[in-house]
Every structure is written in C-alpha cells, then in structure tokens.
Amino acid sequence: MFVAPARARSAALAAALTALAAPSALAFPISSLSGTGQLGFEVISCRDKGGATATCADLAISPVLGQNAVSLFVRTGDVVPLGGDLLLEIVITGQAGFVFSSIFSTLDAAAPLASGGGNVFEPDFITGITNFAQAGPSTASIALGRAWPSVVLNVDYNGTRGLIGSITIGAEPSPVPVPAALGLFGMALAGLLVARRQRG
C-alpha cells in the first residue's frame, strides 16, 4: 500500500479543509444586457451580510423584455429572504452611445418593511454622484444630475423586516436637449428641401 509523505498529506488536508470552508458562490461578475439591448448590467460583487442566507451562490440576472432594465432573482426562493441582507455592486453601461440621466430600483417585496439603499458612483468607483433609499414594495427613481454613459451602483437590500422576492434595476434614456432636437429637425427639413429640388 502506498503512503504519501507526511508533507504531502498535510498539504492535501489543508487544501481539502480550505475547499470545505470556501463559500459556494457564483464566480462574479455576472452580466446581462437590458431587454432593449441599450444597457449592459454587470454585478461585479455580491455579499450576504446577514442571516444564514446563500443568495449570492444562486443569484441570477436576466433582461426585462422591452425595457432598459434587468431582473435580479434566485432560481428557488427569494433574492433577499426574511432576515437577509444583501450587498451588491453593479456597473451599468450604455451600449452604442446610449446615455442615461436617471436609474431606478424596484423592490418586488412581499412585506412593506423590506428596504434598499445605497450610493451611485462615477465609473472611477470613487467619486460619488448621489445616494438613495427605498422601502418595498416600491420603485426608487434616482436622478443623476446629467447624462452618463456608465455608473457604479453600490446598494444594500435589507430583508430584516420583510423578504424581497426580486429586484429590477434599470435606467431611463437621457432626453435630447431642446437645441439639439431643433438642430435635428432643421437638418431633416433641409434634407427634404434638397430632395424636392432634385426631383423638380
């Protein structure tokens, strides 16, 4: 019978114990485009802060059909169980020149005392833009002050007093400024006049 040297046995035992102690979480980041394809959402970190929850291990993300939004959920159960506390860091990025001036967070909460809140940062992860708080079930609309191509959302969803079934996060397109809209209208009108002259 082969007996491994003591040093090899110790190393193998240490590796096995480390594997058992390691949380069974998904490899982050996980990502999805929005239902319109105009935004990219990337969950770059997830941490279960409270209770004996394992939400991060089962967290999934999918587009919300026809909307500039995604849904965060777990395949079985609630994204934040009663007594749970979930901390997420999410990068939201416009695709193909899409910019946005507000984002929103919707809690599909089974109890009115579930809550969420956090901070929105510039893409450098350091400079703060704004912060928000909400109690579910609700939608928090978060104005960003100007149009952004990308932001980082650092948010804590708390189920201490009520569970959260799923979370929807999205953004609204930045409205075209009035001078730019008039400029586009003028260009279109000039194009029509040129086309009419060429036919005539």
Image (tube, grey):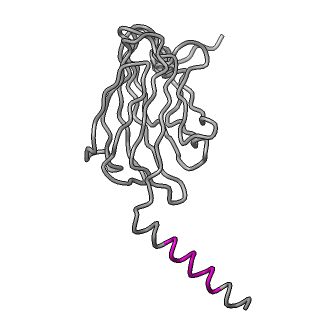
Q: Which residue range is magenta in the image?
A: 184-194
Q: Is residue 188 magenta?
A: yes
Q: Compared to 126, does 55 lie above or below?
A: above
- The answer to which of 35 and 49 lies nearer the viewer is 35
Magenta: main secondary structure: helix
- The answer to which of 129 and 76 lies nearer the viewer is 129
**Relative horizontal placement of residue 179, taking residue 26 as reference (left or right):** left
Q: In what quadrant of the picture does the N terminus appear?
A: top right
Q: Residue furthest front?
A: 200
Total marks shown come to: 0
Estimate the x, y position of residue 26 in percent, counting from the top left.
53, 27
Instruction: Give the quarter of the image for residue 149.
Output: bottom left
Mark yes or no: residue 9 visible: no
Instruction: Give the quarter of the image for residue 74.
Output: top right
**Residue shown at the point (53%, 24%) measured from the top left:** 59
- The answer to which of 31 and 149 lies nearer the viewer is 149
Estimate the x, y position of residue 180 in percent, counting from the top left.
43, 68
Q: Residue furthest right?
A: 199
Q: Residue furthest left?
A: 127
Estimate the x, y position of residue 183 in percent, counting from the top left.
46, 73
Q: In what quadrant of the picture does the C terminus appear?
A: bottom right
**Residue shown at the point (60%, 48%) measured from the top left:** 37
Q: Is residue 22 magenta?
A: no
Mark yes or no: residue 87 visible: yes
Q: Compared to 149, does 80 lie above or below?
A: above
**Residue shown at the point (53%, 54%) measured from the top left:** 95
Estimate the x, y position of residue 54 in percent, counting from the top left.
48, 15
